[in-house]
Amino acid sequence: MNRTIQEITDRIAERSRVSRAAYLERIRRDGEAARAKGPARAHLGCANLAHGFAAASGEDKPALRGSAKPGVAIVTSYNDMLSAHQPYETYPPELKAAVRRAGGVAQVAGGVPAMCDGITQGRAGMELSLYSRDVIAMSTAIALSHDMFDAALLLGVCDKIVPGLLIGALHFGHLPALFVPAGPMTSGLPNKVKARTRQLYAEGKVGRDELLDAEAKSYHSPGTCTFYGTANSNQALMEVMGLHLPGSTFVNPHTELRHALTEAAGRRAVEITAHGPAYTPIGELVDEKSIVNACVALLATGGSTNHTLHLVAMAAAAGIVLTWDDLACLSKVVPLLTRIYPNGQADVNHFRDAGGMQVLIGDLLDAGLLHADVLTVAGPGLDRYRDAPSLEDGELVWTPVTGGSKDLDVLRPVSDPFSADGGIHMVEGNLGRAVSKVSAVKQEHLVIEAPAKVFDDQLDLLRAFEAGELDGQDFVAVIRYQGPSANGMPELHKLTPPLAVLLDRGQRVAIVTDGRMSGASGKVPAAIHLSPEAADGGPIALVRDGDPIRLDSAAGTLELLVPAEELAARTPDGRALSDAQWVGTGRELFAAFRRMAGPAERGAGIFGVSGAESSHHGPGLGFPAEAGLSHLETGTAVSPRHAEAAR
């Protein structure tokens, strides 16, 4: 095992010792009870149980009434608006049939919301996006709260859906749980052509019809979008964590192999219940080693920056305290092994065809960069994930993948990486701490020193671009009051095309923001997720137009080049929207989330570290405002606990 990887894993384990032990004590107690008492529903009162099987039909009804067959919950994010989730329409009957054949009985226990960041980019709905992760976690908990189930099949792909499902399932950590992927759509318009069309539209050189035609050729059928954003980063991480069946991540929808893998997931769910031959509770599977494996995979693939939030939150749900410092240290020893758009021109189908997850995992294991001795839904040990699935005479089989990458422009070995370190860097300085995705940024753009142009709304920057006010000058765009406490930390990906235009014209530009940019952030240098955020009194609230800022993503520094005494004399000249202003598109329903949201580096969520429910740890991954004090209504006031977290 790589020495640094092991040291970081040990450090996380020691930091999490108290909370992880408390979490494991709880789920093991529940697991022992499950093994001793038989299927969960058998212990419901007669009226309770009758409600639970009233709608069942055929052979499922007597099975649910009886107490012999384990029950499997299907928790689904199906809707037919989103391409990634549309294939799930047919999954419940397939899974029910597979579970039935394996000796269990399955029910759709509940649905979770699944919004699309691609649709809501630059719109008010995006301000609900990050909050939806915690809503999904709560929805998952509601689905599993009926005590009817002995395992769960989790149907989700994109953005906040997978992290939310996992957080919810980990709060039922004694239950086994498998993610059942839907797979990516087939390749459409080349990413280079799509990106160029977006820039031409931003310059006014093509019209809406041409742009819409390009987008429709890119996103053209059921399945996940094929670029390597948060959705496909989710999928890669779930496989490396052992929460998918081996090799099931990037198989296209509606194929015979996809169908066979879906059926296999249903069968396996029965086998790993407390009443099967291979009990594998999800709370035991997701441990310090699997979390570190996920971090390594994120860095090695140049994955979505959203996971610097989600990994912290997912780890916390299992009683594990992961920090940005851990990610920064891992990034120094984990090489960048893939070039998938926006980090290159290939898409995830090309990555799969180059050897995909099996070659990637095998090479990382051989280099000692992944922990092999972990639990997975397929059985003990990550070596199982070197095997690729295929159909032989209609039967699903797994075969070890031998040999390396079939396309070194897309996937490289540890011995010959694209970069010696990971694709995500942490930067810090007198403005706070932030995340910088460097895997898609050219070497000459990693360092910039330029005057600030300050915006409190992304639309103001877009208007300035359209008016030509940004032409012919170097600058660092500072977009503030975009953090979790201010407005839900929306993605600001809409800013990438216009700023990319200026970059291509020879201007030196960058972004500094307390908002997000997503896995599709692209070639514009950026320091994002800045913590503490402006709404909590972070120094970004004090930046003025013309202030020199230096961002060095290579060295990991972010500095406002203003004398400390001058900065100390300033007061903020902006503020986040008040509750009265923050209305429309349902945003007013989430006022409590804004008050409770923790800082970005603690996951930007509203939940605590499992097993650490005490006044010492505070109720959230970050810390909410003091009782009766809203971040928004107080403008720039910072609670003492937020100030401590920022330090």
Image: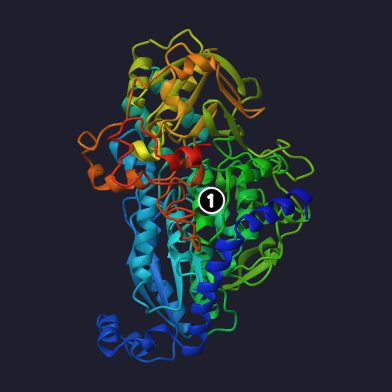
Residue under the point 23% across and 43% down: 588
Which of the 4 image quadrants contains residue 413? top right
Q: Residue furthest toward the top?
A: 472
Q: In this view, does 134 lie above or below 377?
A: above
Q: Is residue 582 above or below residue 110?
A: above
Q: Where is residue 456 in the image (x, y as percent from the top left)?
A: 35, 24
**How many numbered markers are drawn?**
1
Q: In this view, does 276 lie to the left or right of 11?
A: left
Q: In this view, does 369 lie above or below 217?
A: below
Which of the 4 image quadrants contains residue 343? top right
Callout 1 secondary element? helix
Which of the 4 image quadrants contains residue 286? bottom right
Q: Is residue 481 above or below residue 375?
A: above
Residue 158 in sight in this render: yes
Q: Where is residue 363 in the image (x, y as percent from the top left)?
A: 74, 52
Residue 102 in sight in this render: no
Dot 1: within a 10 Å radius of its alpha carbon, few (fewer than 14), some, or many (20 or more) residues? many
Residue under the point 28% across and 90% down: 46
For the N terminus, the quadrant is bottom right
Q: Position of residue 483 (x, y in %)?
A: 40, 36
Residue under the point 69% across and 50% down: 8
Q: Where is residue 220 in the image (x, y as percent from the top left)?
A: 40, 44
Dot 1 corresponds to which residue? 311
* Amino acid carrying mark 1 in the image: Leu
